[in-house]
Amino acid sequence: NAGVTQTPKFQVLKTGQSMTLQCAQDMNHEYMSWYRQDPGMGLRLIHYSVGAGITDQGEVPNGYNVSRSTTEDFPLRLLSAAPSQTSVYFCASSYRVTDFSYEQYFGPGTRLTVT
Amino acid sequence: TQLLEQSPQFLSIQEGENLTVYCNSSSVFSSLQWYRQEPGEGPVLLVTVVTGGEVKKLKRLTFQFGDARKDSSLHITAAQPGDTGLYLCAGVPLWNYGGSQGNLIFGKGTKLSVKP
């Protein structure tokens, strides 16, 4: 199993450009999420999905779109890049272990710089 | 206000020393998790604690969930340079029990450096 894969690993965009960060998992997990990680801010949830066709907003959704057409894929779209979106982006997939807990697996991250 | 407070933020120690890092909240959590993140990589799940007072051991790492399920600690015995990394706690607040996993909340992390 490859686990959670993300592409690209690095990306530089100019302000106003759009792009899609790709995320795929081969573990048949129901849940997938996108986080951004900034120095001093920790991991913040952007969007998440509880299954194919179902998505919802997290803590910091503005400027990002997602869709989930298959269980495996969960792309994150930046509509019009801004310098404030410079960050490291992590995709994660997870499954419910018990009513009380999930096991979450993270991808290797995409380092995005917006100039 | 950060729902999960981690302390200390930074910790630099010598190989062989013991250390404890903390994860505290004023809210009750249905479970808490600890992750380790190495530079340039995604976080990796170390452990999940579910029951108040629970203690779990993973080699030289000991994890404890507070009796009231509002806090957790991670103790490392005889730290090694390979333990270097960012340690993150995360959990689902009890008021969101049964809700979507989208409500997994992360602390800001403790950055540990173990020098040889």
Image: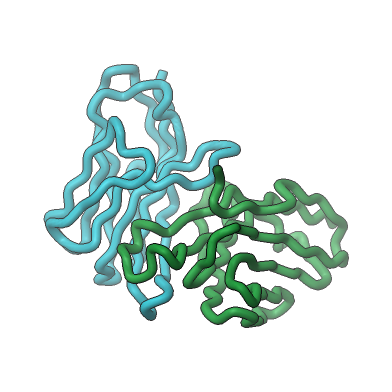
Chain colours: A cyan, B green
Residue A102's spot in the image, x, y percent?
40, 71
Asked if residue B106 lies left or right of residue A10, the reply is right
Residue at horizontal 49 percent and vertical 63 percent from the top: B91
Question: Residue A96: which quarter of the image?
Answer: bottom left
Is residue A50 placed above or below B40 in the rendered structure? below
Q: Nearer the viewer, residue B106 or A75?
A: B106
Q: Is residue A58 above or below residue A13?
A: below
Name which residue lies at 80% across and 72% down: B77
Q: Quadrant of the N terminus of chain B?
A: top right
Locate residue A83: give its quadrant.
Answer: top left
Residue A88 in the image, given as x and y percentages of width and height: 46, 40
* Residue B68 showing in the rendered view: yes
Across and down, in percent, residue B93 comes to: 46, 63
Query: Which quarter of the image is occupied by the C terminus of chain B?
Result: bottom right
Along the line of sight, the residue nearer the viewer: B15 or B67 = B67
At 54% from the left and 39% from the top, the residue drawn is: A41
Relative to A23, residue B46 above or below: below
Looking at the image, residue B1 sits to the left or right of residue A89; the answer is right
Residue A1 in view, yes or no? no
Q: Position of residue B17 (x, y in %)?
A: 87, 65
Residue A114's quadrant in the figure?
top left
Count of number-bearing discs: 0
